[in-house]
Image (cartoon, helix red, strand yellow):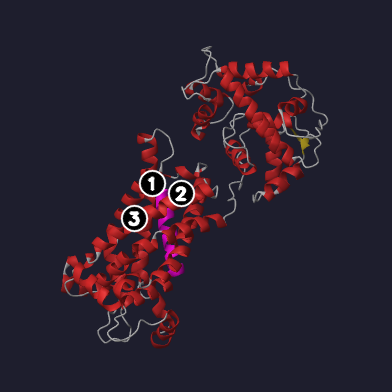
Amino acid sequence: MDAKEAAFSGNPRRPTDCCNPVKQLGPISLEHVLLALRESKEERDLRTRSLFNFFDAANLGYLDYAQIEAGLLALQIPAEYKYAKDLLKVCDANRDGRVDYHEFRRYMDVKELELYRIFQAIDVEHNGCILPEELWDALVQAGIEIDDEELARFVEHVDKDNNGIITFEEWRDFLLFYPHEATIENIYHHWERVCLVDIGEQAVIPEGISKYVHPFRYFIAGGIAGAASRTATAPLDRLKVVLQVQTTRAWIMPAIKKIWKEDGLLGFFRGNGLNVVKVAPESAIKFYTYEMLKGMIANSRDEEKRDIGTAGRLFSGGIAGAVAQTAIYPLDLLKTRLQTFSCEGEKVPKLGKLTKDLWVHEGPRVFYKGLVPSLLGIIPYAGIDLAAYETLKDVSKTYILQDSDPGPLVQLACGTISGALGATCVYPLQVIRTRMQAQSSNRGAAYQGMTDVFWQTLKREGYGGFYKGLLPNLLKVVPAASITYLVYERMKKWLELD
């Protein structure tokens, strides 16, 4: 008899040659649970006490974190899932850091009712057991893609008597100490984790079960996060671009006065609409690609997605940034042309006319002018930015928050530091890119390429020329990065992507 069987030995397992149908005639109660388990109230009390004693191996009369963690480990639930901490929090009604028998029993009552409700929802035929096709239907309705082989593994893992069906007793035993809400998506991911690290006699390492649920949700989360940070920082973005293209000595106040003189208050928001349109797909593609690459690296190493290390984060962040920047680069060039267009008696061209003029007079290649320095900048920027953010978040969880989830203020601080660090490191490449984007290919004094921009800037303006507009850029990046990550984390929770 292994540890898991011993834990549930308060009520010996009955034969399950047939299902035990329960007609649901009203609200679900513990009477339904007893009927489904074929238990009397006294037998259930004995089982609950036996489970409590299993965890209370030291006979302290209560359960603390160490005892719960040891008990879960004996049930083959690894400590890295932090279920012990969550289970203690759920059970500890009076928040004294201990779980007495009455609190444990209250948890058992609530959890078994919760598990029975979802069991009944999956058991559409109400014959008292879950058939493989019923489980598959429930997963599909929750948006989870699963093939026949994975479904067979799922059923086999839960179906302890190997009769091809899942009884409520088997369902309960599998999920009883899962401390989170028992939704079909959570249950699937719980099985995925447990199955991946099964430490029984025959280790089970299923292939390809880490599929993303509703991948489009990552696009939504990233898109909203990127767009949300733009309007508030639009004036700083316009000021930064104006300073970057100045080859003479650049001062912030004269630049502000010039923008105000040309267009008034709206001048500070020139190109903002296009910027929002550009940033939404860029952020969505970047974050989605980043999550995909993290998953691929984690699968190749047989480890959790969140534990791929700094090198893995740098690689994933860099590639994700390059893919996103290439996809939206024509919009970025159009935005720069709008922001650097000198009025001087002319009206700012409409987006359609500007696009047509560029195509006719400078050719289609103009829409990717400056792409090389852009990619050279975006790869280290995205890598440093995303890697620093997640590293800072992990450090704060480990050393400051004691494994608690970072709150909004911590997320803002992490986003601020990572965004400022990434932007400063690659800023010279941003200046080179912006100057190439802003310049018409038909001018006689046109830069001949990225190298020419570098040498001309160095010769005329010195090293300081590569940092023109850095101050408004930092003032823009800090809140933009912070808001982006804060919204992204909130959207991930709201869309159930964590």
The CA distance from mark 2 to mark 1 is: 8 Å
Q: Predominant secondary structure in magenta?
A: helix
The residue wearing badge 3 is: 479
Q: Amino acid at mark 2?
A: Glu
Residue 172 seen in the figure: yes
Q: Amino acid at mark 1?
A: Gln
Q: Residue at x 43, y 64 (%)?
A: 279
Q: Residue at x 52, y 21 (%)?
A: 99
In the rendered structure, the answer to whether residue 468 lies left or right of residue 191 reads left
* Residue 152 place in picture, x, y as percent: 71, 42
* Vertical side of 467 occupied by 121: above or below: above
- Specify start and end residues of the magenta stretch as a single range: 311-328
Q: In the displayed image of the protein, which residue is found farthest to the top?
A: 59
Magenta-colored stretch includes residue 398:
no
* Residue 110 place in picture, x, y as percent: 63, 29
Q: Amino acid at mark 3?
A: Pro
Evaluate if marks 2 and 1 touch, with contact meaning CB atoms under 8 Å apart.
yes
**Count of residue discs:** 3
In the rendered structure, the answer to whether residue 164 lies left or right of residue 407 reads right
